[in-house]
Image (cartoon, coloured by chain):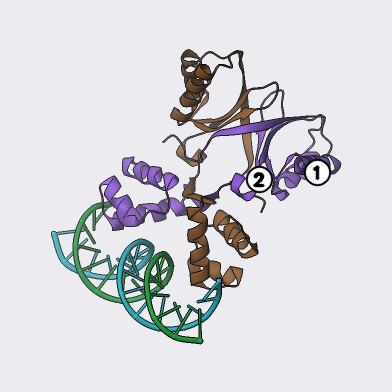
Chain colours: A purple, B brown, C cyan, D green
Amino acid sequence: MKIDDTDLKILSQLQTDASQSLDDIAKSVGSSKTPVWNRIRKMREAGVIGPQVAVLNAEALGFEACFFVLIRTSEHEADWQRKFLKALRDRPEVQEAHRLAGDVDYILKVRVRNARAYDEFYQALISEVKVHNVTALLSMEEIKMTTALPL
Amino acid sequence: MKIDDTDLKILSQLQTDASQSLDDIAKSVGSSKTPVWNRIRKMREAGVIGPQVAVLNAEALGFEACFFVLIRTSEHEADWQRKFLKALRDRPEVQEAHRLAGDVDYILKVRVRNARAYDEFYQALISEVKVHNVTALLSMEEIKMTTALPL
DNA sequence: TCTGAAAAAACTTCCGG
DNA sequence: CCGGAAGTTTTTTCAGA
């Protein structure tokens, strides 16, 4: 799928504020409703535009602890990995999980109500799957958080 | 602000799919349009519900590299920190930035088109502010990514 | 506070340049 | 493929219970 300059402008608007009206988007990209609507529809179908979500205020809802978890493992078998990935995807506290290149094998971002809740998560995880070494980094302050891409 | 059970159900819907109609949300939480609408308005005003965004497909748009950057610094003066934070907030490649407790001082999530673009970012950052030690972890695979809280 | 209806706005489709 | 106009759905407001 090829994305032109107008598409990029539309995406840029949508990833910043998806609640604005088609009219406003059309105005801001210098076009009108129909073409903008067709472009959005196409990009949705192509999977370029994913889900539309409301970002909630974690602290206001009592989620006051955020950990980045570095995981090293000795196990690299397919079966172990399948179990591990499933465990991560099933746990809602895990907001983000990446498989890494190099020394550290995985990094997780875990959002919980407090340190105790993290410990519960941690105990549950290591009882499900064996991991060699775990380092938890506790966030003191969220300096920046965005899902926007630098288009 | 106090959040009751119905509010939580509404939030749960919105953080998963903010494009659905008020009618659908009302149905799924067992209420009707007006009360749901009033609750959403209140939570927006209170800042519990933040921005509404479209999540884009990074890979489809050519952002094929994602790094987690661990930063250790010897500088802890207010002035240095102010400059550093501003640099992070001004750079759109930085999707996430946290100040940490302990050994590592900061963690960043940096999304770029390729490894070369990361190096450019890195060079620009260290020329702006002095940092003691930087470790970059390269993501090979995004296993999971959500902004949803485990309500 | 909720329900239901009415007004306003937005979305979606369709047709002429 | 774009732009404008028409029909449809949704959002938002408002009165009554």
Q: Image quadrant of residue D5?
A: bottom left
Horizontally, residue B132 falls left or right of residue A22, namely right
Q: Which residue is mark 2?
A: A63
Q: Which residue is mark 1?
A: A120
Q: Secondary structure at mark 2?
A: loop
Horizontally, residue A3 falls left or right of residue B140, namely left
Q: What whole-number distance in Å separates the C-alpha atoms at marks 2 and 1?
A: 15 Å
Kind of residue at disc 2: Phe
User: Residue A70 location in percent, x, y?
Assistant: 72, 30
Could you say which is closer to the camera, residue B116 or residue B129?
B129
Q: Secondary structure at mark 1?
A: helix
Instruction: Say which chain tag 2 marks.
Output: A
Instruction: Say which chain tag 1 marks.
Output: A
Q: Is residue B129 visible?
A: yes
- Which residue is pictured at 48% across the width and 60% down the height? B41
Could you say which is closer to the camera, residue A54 or residue D17?
D17
Q: Is residue B78 above or below residue A118?
A: above
Could you say which is closer to the camera, residue B23 or residue A51?
B23
Q: Is residue B28 above or below residue B117?
A: below
For the residues labelled 2 and 1, say whether their Cβ atoms are less than 8 Å apart.
no
Q: Earlier in the sequence, mark 2 or mark 1?
A: 2
Horizontally, residue A125 falls left or right of residue B84, namely right
Q: Residues within 10 Å of mark 2 (few under 14, many from 20)?
A: some
- Which residue is pictured at 53% across the width and 19% down the height? B78
Q: Image quadrant of residue B100?
A: top right
